[in-house]
Amino acid sequence: MRILLIEDEAALARPLAEHLEADHHIVEWFQTLGEADSAIRALEYDVVLLDLQLPDGDGLAFLSQLRDHHLRTPVIILTARDKISDRIDGLNRGADDYVIKPFDLDEVKARIHTVCRRSADQLAQTLTLRDLTLNLSSQSVSRAGVPVRLTAKEWSILEVLLRRKSQIVSKETLETAIYAYGDEVESNALEAHISRLRAKLGRDLIVTHRGMGYTLTP
Ligand code: CA
């Protein structure tokens, strides 16, 4: 794994980096948020270990910025401040876990494995097509990183189309997906939902095959 370590105290960072490298990880260690920020824009990391008090700023503000830019890399906070408010604040801002200093090196290693496994599970919870991402666990949709609000029926249509993205999906299949058993199906309702989906996600997204059904643009 490629690990970004942001910690200004060399006495803490050095042994941790060595311990993780001995475990065959690649560790890039920076002592300022400025350097870490350039690194994370240039390269992909599997996990970020983040101290909260850095010489050039606050680790929590840095974390908020990452999440605002839709960077989903797992973040583990390294904190000396074992006040409960800091931990809650960190988790609210999108941290995946935290360890309290002074930490046990094996404990940090175990936390890294846990958050990375969790993040791999979350990836399995998404359906994607080019820049379109549908997250099944959070029930959210985004295109090019921008969240899009869908109604429950629009969501169901998109999910069916994404699950069968190489096939033409018939009107009947989509109607079954959006109506509960016994509901009266209104004529043209499906077309109305599809047209709203196009308005929200781009006109080019869904192709109509007359008399056959719909597909997503490959
Ligand atoms: Ca520090």
Image: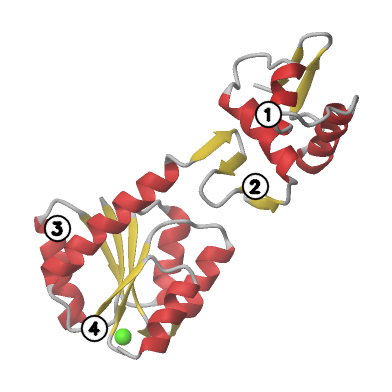
Residue topped by disc 3: 21
In the displayed orientation, state which residue is furthest to the top.
211
Residue that carries the numbered disc 2 in the rendered image: 142
What residue does disc 4 label?
A: 9
175 or 78, nearer to the observer: 175
Q: Is residue 8 above or below residue 158?
A: below
Q: Quick one: label 2, few (<14), some, or many (20+) residues within 10 Å?
A: some
Give yes or no for contact between labels 4 and 1 (Cβ–Cβ under 8 Å). Answer: no
**Residue type, numbered disc 1:** Ala
Q: Are marks 3 and 2 in contact (CB under 8 Å)?
A: no
Discs 1, 3 touching: Cβ within 8 Å: no
- Please identify, in this view, whether the residue under mark 2 or under mark 1 is nearer the observer: 1
User: Please, which residue is most extreme toward the front here?
Assistant: 182
Tell me the distance, in whole angstroms, between the alpha carbons under discs 2 and 1: 21 Å
Q: Which residue is mark 1?
A: 177
Badge 3 marks a residue whose secondary structure is helix
Q: Quadrant of ligand 1?
A: bottom left
Determine which of the numbered discs, if any, sits on residue 193 in the image.
Answer: none
Within 8 Å: ligand 1 and the Cβ of disc 2?
A: no
In the figure, residue 172 lies in which quadrant?
A: top right
Q: Position of residue 203 (x, y in %)?
A: 82, 32
Judge whether residue 42 can be spotted in this image. Answer: yes
